[in-house]
Amino acid sequence: MIGKSNYEKRPVIQIADDSSGCLQGWPEVMSALVQKLAGRQRAVVVFECYPGVLLDELPMVLREAFKESQILSAEDVYKEPRALADQFATSLTDDPVFGFMKHWDLTDFIDPLRLATQQQTLADHEGLIFIIGAAAIHVATNPDLLIYGDVARWEIQRRQRAHLTGNLGMHNAADSASRIYKHSFFVDWRAADRQRHELYCRIDYFLDLNDQQEPRMLAGDKLRQAVSKVVTQPFRVVPFFDPGPWGGTWMREHFDLPDGPPNYAWCFDCVPEENSVLLGFGDRVLELPASVLVHEEPEALLGQRIYQWFGAEFPIRFDFLDTVNGGNLSLQVHPLTAYVREHFGMNYTQDESYYILDCCEGAQVYLGLLEGLNKERMQTALEEAQRGGKPFAAEEFVNVWPVRKHDHFLIPAGTIHCSGKDALVLEISATPYIFTFKLWDWGRLGLDQRPRPIHLSHGLENIQWNRTTSWVKEELIDQVQEVDQGQGWYEERTGLHASEFLETRRHWFTETVLHDTAGNLNVLNLVEGDEVLIESPSGAFAPLRIHYAETFIVPACVGQYSIKPLTSTSRPSATMKAYVRDMKQL
């Protein structure tokens, strides 16, 4: 096991040396708006926002700064919660975890009669009027000033868990966090992402409300310039760490994480839909959902081919699973592509792999079925365990493989699998997020002391029963092939499986290695070595310092970049790189 890392938990992408363009705190924000609106006899200002933004402070500071103004709330034009629930029922379904992806817009939340009433109030008002809240832009479609308030996806989830916010129009903040999250995932966030994209080029000011007591505000043109700059250089997103019932202690120890949670099970180190980026303006920092980069600069970030295949979606996911001094993950399977498309409205599935970044002696991975197993007997055993009967004896049906540091296990969809305890796994996968079918969870409860949902019927329909010991050994384990070498480095192909659309390459090096995106998004992690420097051979971007276990993104438009070790070359450093294959070859 390695010692403590210099892992950077709040990486900042420096945009400018001058902080004057980034306003901080309500006094500065209100002062800028007062100056902007000075001398106007009548003006309409829209404070549009993402669901989950807390606006408790806003009416108070607006009334203090603009004493003669009127404030309208967009919530007053929403349909009744019961009507919204009925409308979204086909997307949300009765399942506790999964729903169905549909094309919802924020207009679907609005009651036409209530909207007409508020628009009449707007028309009758002669002075300064503010409309605040998600869907406010539909009350005043052509405002004099458009301000957009946003918050990081993980901050929204923290607020949901603390019952500070619920779903748009539902008044359900007291509901369980899992139900609120599901509603957000399948309805609220899809509609809000679509609207933010539609408004992006119109935004006059962007308001970072991750801290509603101390907001940050940036002019819209400066935001768009910053986003365009970020995707021309390698960068890191802000990682998020979360506890889980099987979680371990490796990340707490090696990444110097705070005490408080019982463990840290996950680290979302490169999941742009979930993560954020920190933009530095002098000594001030503005936090922006990383999904904005994907939605607004998809060709520069992803590359033209990926954009054509996937649209404005980031298809590569890097995250950590920590089971050191913890427990096994749930025994699980991911849906086949045709199944996830038919049942959940997703275009692709979570093909994945486990890269063993570190482990204790005796660590194991469960992968594939034993030769000659009886399918009916396994199904009966799983069903009995689910009913609370005899615990499922996984080792009687599933292969258990010993693991070593730097092993790479390939897990195409349909393959039964889970990490055992005492491993730090770098999970490299496609990115459909939540579509995991748990088959057996070792009889334990979640952190909320409730049973975790098991999706046995879905899982049994997707298990590929021919993926037994010999097939797994031949197709999914020890697939390392040397493909190239040079002065002080060599490159290996480690997977993924031929049925998966991701390719992974490992470089071992004691000297500088030259890489080229070739117009294709690259995602890398420093899996060996203390520190490296990412540089542009032509000086096109500022050098980026990367520490052990940090994941970084290299946008497709970057082209050539080099990776140079900064510590002793007595032992080689290593990176794991993932990119999307030519889909025409699959």
Image (spheres, rainbow, N blue to C red):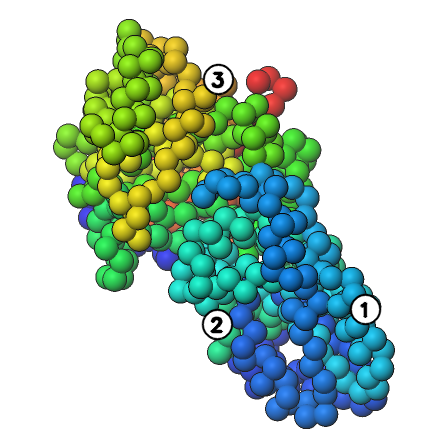
- Three-letter amino acid code at disc 1? Ala
Q: Which mark is residue 498?
A: 3
Above or below 461: residue 517: below
What crowding class fits label 2: few (fewer than 14 Cα within 10 Å), some (14-19), or many (20 or more)? some
Specify which label sits upstream in the sequence, 2 or 3.
Answer: 2
Q: Quarter-wise, where is residue 71 in the image? A: bottom right
Q: Secondary structure at mark 2?
A: loop
Q: Residue 354 is drawn in which quadrant?
A: top left
Residue closest to the eye, 404 or 60: 60
Seen from the viewer's position, the closer of residues 560 and 146 is 146
The reply to whether discs 1 and 3 touch (Cβ–Cβ < 8 Å) is: no
**Where does label 2 land, which residue?**
211
The correct choice, above or below, for 438 with respect to 555 in the image is above
Q: Which image quarter: residue 581? A: top right
Instruction: Name the amino acid, label 2.
Output: Asp
Question: What residue lies at 73% left-to-right and 56% top-to-bottom?
Answer: 107
Residue at screen point 72% across, 92% down: 68
Instruction: Provide residue 255's location: percent of width, then percent of height.
Output: 28, 53
